[in-house]
Image: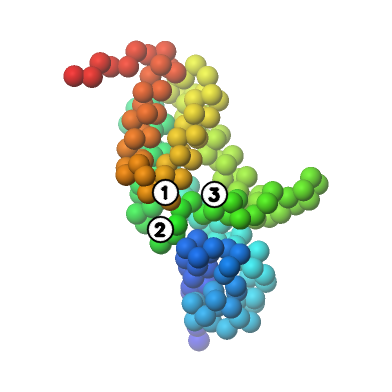
Amino acid sequence: MANPQHTRERILDAAEMLFFTEGIATTGVDRVAASAGVAIVTLYKHFGSKDNLLREVLSRRLDSWTRHWDEAVAGAGAAEERLLAVFDAIESFRASSGPTQWCCFLATASERPAPEDGRTDPVFDLIRQDTELVTDRLAQLAREAGCRDPAATASVLLLLYNGVLSSLLRGAPSDPVALARSTARSIIGPAAGRIPAARS
């Protein structure tokens, strides 16, 4: 008898790969079920709907990203390095993830309109949760690094973070993570009231 948890993971793996290489709207649940090697009725038994499946894919992705960022921060030394660890986390997360075009949250937001006022959308709620996680954590790390305006520093780093993810999709510049990290480092020193070290 098939292990239900293994079946669930196979479906999630197939959905993640197809949604974020071929597109969410163009990928039907029949295609996901076939790729996972299960019947459509089995997919619906586990997830109920395509929206629920997408939400679970994003939730799993968010948990994985958070673990990678936690590990990157824990492995960093000084407070400034902990703030820059977001770029290390991007590299380790992408190295461990399956083949996808780019950030699953940005990809979902690009295909899915924001809900109208007063309406709820569990999928879009996860997109907001991801944005809040990145923004709030960058602000906290900026405070720990002594930045005079942690919120402003977090906003600039979020801009660089988004730029890295988009550049990975575009394919240029060739090493956006290193470039973003270098740019962020040049920003953090003045933001904390320090003079950047002279380059030899």
Q: Amino acid at mark 2?
A: Ser
**Crowding near the residue tagged with mark 2, few <14, some 14–19, many ≥20 C-alpha atoms within 10 Å:** few
Q: Amino acid at mark 3?
A: Leu
**Crowding near the residue tagged with mark 1, few <14, some 14–19, many ≥20 C-alpha atoms within 10 Å:** few
Up-down relation of residue 93 to residue 9 (above or below):
above
> N-terminal of the two: label 2 or label 1?
2
Q: Is residue 137 left or right of residue 173?
A: right
Q: Position of residue 53 (x, y in %)?
A: 61, 66
Please name the residue shown 69% across and 48% down the image: 114
Q: Is residue 174 left or right of residue 147?
A: left
Image quarter in which the C terminus is found: top left
In terms of depth relative to the viewer, which is nearer, 95 or 169? 169
- The residue wearing badge 2 is 97
CA–CA distance in space, label 2 to label 1: 18 Å
In terms of depth relative to the viewer, which is nearer, 74 or 20? 20
Please name the residue shown 42% across and 39% down the image: 86
- The residue wearing badge 1 is 170
Front tag of 2 and 1: 1
Which picture quadrant has residue 50?
A: bottom right
Q: Position of residue 140 (x, y in %)?
A: 51, 29
Q: Amino acid at mark 1?
A: Arg
- The residue wearing badge 3 is 106
C-beta proximity under 8 Å, tags 2 and 3: no
> N-terminal of the two: label 2 or label 3?
2
